[in-house]
């Protein structure tokens, strides 16, 4: 990378450089005196392809007035870089007047040989007085850049959150999906057994009274059973009792398994045995066993697929994927419930307990539901990270006058004083490398502010509380909001 002053050999002289500034898209209408000031305080610099004028985490040296070439700005995590923005000839980037930029949040790479006039940071601070016209132009450029960065930061955090939630939801959905697949395989076998048993029963040639009794017993067998709610120990005892009864009546004891999860009693079975011969009893029970199995497997498939449907519905509700991108009445309690569904796998992995308490009189908010759900996800996810194994997270939503207050409380070790003042800073994180973007709380604060609310935090060992207050009838969503970088 080479850097030369305007008067150095091989670089433009002052007159040529002034003409290039005059032709610059952003500076074309600037007064001559302001262009002269920029020339006096600027340094001509040339960068080759692959150079890094700005590196992540390092101070930005000043304002770059691009005269030729192209720059691309990248941000990322876990070694994966994502293009955020690029600048070309006619653009101005770096530290702009009134900018609060300190260190770079990403790395800027030269894509095409770059020539630029660099105005040092300390001189940029004087520009509102010395170059008011140029300052006004650059303030608009800075606001556009801030909106673009904010949008990209939000997208980056969404992608990171989505990756974590997707992993949890994949685990959540896999359990009922696997159960449904297993039950479906067993159902095929049970149906084949039921067909064979039906043919055996037909050959038994039951008379009408025997058929009526068998139908009554079968109705009990196929009804929704209360016995299925037994504890494992009591269920084992019941299965053993039925197996003993079957063996005493010369019937295959393996039929005890499907009969156990029914409401059949030994008295009913004894009544059936008293009305049927031994051969007819064996045929009747062989017919009822597969029938009970088929009904039980069908129930399991229904329960498993219903659970999958509930989880998919929670994902849709959490993301508001089928809603228009406009504020609408939002049920905060429902959003919190959907968020906890999304984070259920993580809570189980932590061995933690998450409690939700939503006031009955909680009003709806005029809000972007997906954005609020992202706030709840960030706060609850951080709380789960903070608690020890087996810890507790409590989420409380109440009404306070004309506001809704959501409190996320954890019993973790608390936030150290030197960290507390920085937790809302972008890219600041206490998580291990690769485990966090450092954008979660910054994004949450921006989204809450967008809804005319605010976040407060109190912490001490054993109790940390994030308190979000949102107005019931906020009007901020009806007008655009600017955010400085």
Image (cartoon, rainbow, N blue to C red):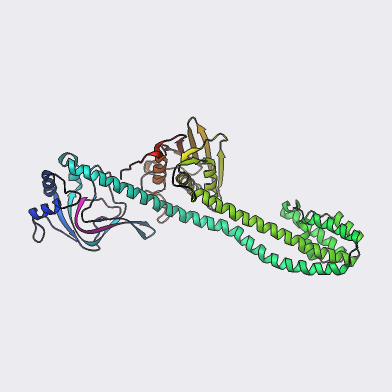
Res. 126 visible in picture: no
- Whether 124 is drawn above or below 255: the answer is above
Residue under the point 51% across and 42% down: 411
Residue 132 at x, y percent in the picture: 18, 40
- Whether 32 is drawn above or below 300: the answer is above
Residue under the point 45% across and 36% down: 469
> Which of 298/55 is in front?
298
Res. 11 visible in picture: yes
Residue 65 at x, y percent in the picture: 19, 52
Q: On the rendered image, what quadrant is the C terminus found in?
A: top left
Residue 268 at x, y percent in the picture: 86, 55
Q: Which residues are magenta?
A: 53-72
Residue 61 at x, y percent in the picture: 22, 51
The stretch drawn in magenta includes residue 68: yes
Res 89 quadrant in image: bottom left
Res 417 quadrant in image: top left
Q: Report the side of 241 relative to 462 (left or right).
A: right
Q: On the rendered image, what quadrant is the N terminus found in?
A: bottom left
Q: Report the side of 27 relative to 426 (left or right).
A: left
- Whether 377 is drawn above or below 467: the answer is below
> Which of 100/127 is in front?
127
Q: Report the side of 76 relative to 229 (left or right).
A: left
């Amino acid at each position: 990378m080479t850097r030369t002053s305007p008067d150095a050999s091989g670089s433009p002289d002052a007159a040529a450089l002034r003409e290039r500034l005059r032709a610059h898209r952003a500076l074309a209408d600037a007064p001559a005196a302001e262009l002269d000031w920029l020339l006096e305080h600027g340094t001509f610099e040339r960068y080759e392809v692959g150079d890094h004028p700005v590196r992540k985490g390092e101070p930005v040296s000043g304002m770059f007035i691009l005269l030729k070439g192209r720059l691309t700005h990248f941000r990322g995590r876990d070694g994966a870089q994502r293009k955020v923005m690029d600048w070309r000839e006619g653009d101005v980037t770096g530290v702009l007047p009134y900018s609060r930029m300190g260190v770079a949040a990403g790395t800027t790479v030269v894509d095409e040989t770059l020539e630029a006039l660099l105005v040092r940071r300390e001189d940029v601070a004087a520009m509102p007085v010395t170059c008011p016209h140029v300052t006004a132009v650059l303030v608009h450029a800075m606001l556009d850049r801030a909106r673009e960065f904010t949008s990209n930061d939000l997208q980056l955090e969404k992608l990171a959150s989505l990756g974590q939630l997707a992993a949890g939801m994949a685990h959540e959905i896999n359990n009922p999906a696997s159960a449904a697949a297993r039950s479906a395989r067993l159902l095929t076998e049970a149906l084949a057994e039921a067909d064979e048993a039906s043919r055996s029963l037909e050959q038994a040639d039951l008379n009408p009274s025997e058929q009526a009794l068998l139908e009554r017993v079968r109705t009990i067998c196929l009804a929704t059973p209360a016995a299925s709610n037994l504890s494992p120990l009591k269920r084992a005892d019941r299965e053993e009792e039925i197996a003993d009864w079957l063996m005493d009546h010369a019937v295959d004891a393996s039929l005890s398994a499907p009969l156990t999860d029914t409401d059949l009693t030994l008295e009913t079975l004894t009544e059936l045995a008293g009305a049927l011969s031994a051969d007819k009893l064996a045929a009747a029970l062989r017919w009822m066993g597969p029938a009970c199995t088929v009904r039980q497997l069908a129930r399991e498939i229904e329960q498993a697929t219903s659970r999958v449907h509930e989880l998919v519905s929670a994902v849709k509700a959490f993301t508001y994927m089928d809603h228009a991108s406009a504020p609408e009445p939002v049920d905060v309690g429902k959003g919190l419930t959907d968020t906890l569904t999304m984070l259920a796998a993580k809570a189980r992995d932590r061995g933690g307990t998450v409690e939700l308490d939503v006031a009955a009189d909680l009003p709806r908010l005029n809000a972007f539901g997906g954005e609020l759900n992202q706030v709840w996800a960030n706060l609850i996810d951080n709380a789960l990270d903070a608690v020890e194994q087996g810890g507790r997270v409590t989420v409380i939503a109440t009404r306070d006058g004309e506001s809704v207050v959501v409190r996320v409380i954890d019993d973790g070790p608390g936030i150290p004083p030197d960290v507390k003042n920085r937790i809302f800073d972008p890219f600041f994180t206490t998580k291990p490398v690769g485990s966090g973007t450092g954008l979660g709380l910054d994004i949450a604060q921006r989204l809450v502010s967008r809804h005319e609310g605010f976040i407060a935090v109190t912490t001490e060992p054993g109790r940390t509380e994030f308190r979000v207050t949102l107005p019931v009838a906020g009007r901020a969503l009806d007008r655009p909001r600017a955010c400085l970088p």
